[in-house]
Amino acid sequence: MKNENSLFQMPFCTALAFLITGHAAAAVPSISSLIFDAPNVVGIFADDDQATPLEAEATTVPKSPWSSTIGAGLSYSQTDNVNVGANFNGSFARNDENSKWETSLKYIYNFDDNEVKDNFGVIQTSFERLLDDHPKWLWFTQASFQYNETEAYKTRTKAFGGLGFLVSRSDDLKLLIKGGLGASKDRNGDSGIIPRSLVGYSVDWAINDLVRLTSEGSIENDIGAYSEYLTVLELKLTVKVSKINNLGLYLTLRDEYDSNPALGDSWNQVWLTMGLSYSF
C-alpha cells in the first residue's frame, strides 16, 4: 500500500536539496571568480577591518638615497704623445630632496716599452645643500686630490666652497651654475698655497630611459695673478645595456689645462676613457 503523503514529501525533499546546494554554491567561489575577481573573493573570507594579503603586497618600499657605480675599460690619453691604456673608476653618492653628497675615484694607467706613459688618479668629493628659504639656491663644498707620475707637480690638492643656483631641477634635467673661493697646492718644489676663485657648472641630463649625459666644468683663477688659471672639463655619456642587471657602457672625456705650467709640465692634458659599468 502506497503512502498517501509521498507525493508531498518528494517535492519538499527536492526543494530542500536545492536550497542546500544553492547555499553551498554561493559560499564557494568559482574558478573564474578566483582568477578575475580576486580582491572580492578574498573579501568574502577576510575581515573588513583588516588589510588583505594583496593590499599588503601593494605597499611600496621607499627608494634608498644611496647609490654606487663601478666601472673599468680602456683609455686613450694625449699629452706630448698619444697613449692607450686601461682605466678604473668608482663612485658612491647620497641624494635626497635637500642635499647631495658624492665621492668618486678615477684612475688611468698605461705602460709601454718598459716606460710608464700614464699613471694618473684623482679622488673628488662634493656636498651640496639647498637653502631653506630659497629652494633654487644652495651652498656647496668640494675638494679633490690628484696624482700624476708623468707631470712635475706630482700631486695637486684643491678645495673650494661657495654658492650655486639651480637653473633647472626637473627629473630629466638638472643644471647648476656655481661660484666660490678656495685654494690649491702642488707638490712642486717650494710652491705654496695659491688662493683661487672658482666659476663652474654641472649638468645631469636623462636623455631617455637608456641614455644619460653628465658634465662638470670649472675655471680656477689665481687671485694674486688673475690671468693665470686652471680649467677642468669632464663629460660622461652612459648607455644602459641591461635594466635588470644595471649594466651600462660609458664614454668619458676629461681635459685639464694649466695656463702657467711648471717646468716639465704640460699645458693641456686630455684623457678619453670607455668601458663597462655596474650600478647598485
Image (tube, rainbow, N blue to C red):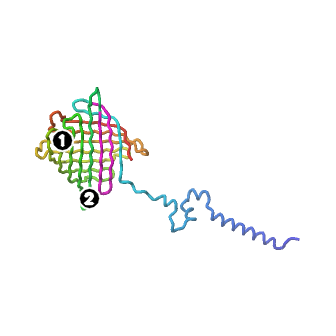
Q: Quadrant of residue 22?
A: bottom right
Q: Is residue 141 left or right of residue 207?
A: left
Q: Position of residue 136 (x, y in %)?
A: 25, 56
Residue carrying label 2: 135
* Residue at image coords 32%, 41%: 89
Q: Nearer the viewer, residue 195 or 80?
A: 195
- Identify which residue, 266 or 57, lies in the foreground: 266
Q: Which residues are magenta?
A: 83-109
Name the quadrant of the N terminus.
Answer: bottom right
* Pointer 2 or 1: first along the chain: 2
Task: Classify 184 as above or below 52.
Answer: above
- Provide the secondary structure element on which disc 2 rests: loop
Q: Residue at label 1?
A: 186
Q: Residue 77: percent from the left, percent from the top? A: 27, 33
| Number of other residues with Cα within 10 Å of mark 1, as a class: few under 14, some 14 to 19, many 20 or more | many
Residue 115, by quadrant, is top left
The residue sitting at the left extreme is 224
Question: SS at mark 1?
Answer: strand
Circles 2 and 1 in contact, beta carbons < 8 Å: no
* Residue 219 among those drawn in magenta: no
Q: Marks 2/1: CA distance?
A: 37 Å
Name the chief secondary structure element in magenta. Answer: strand
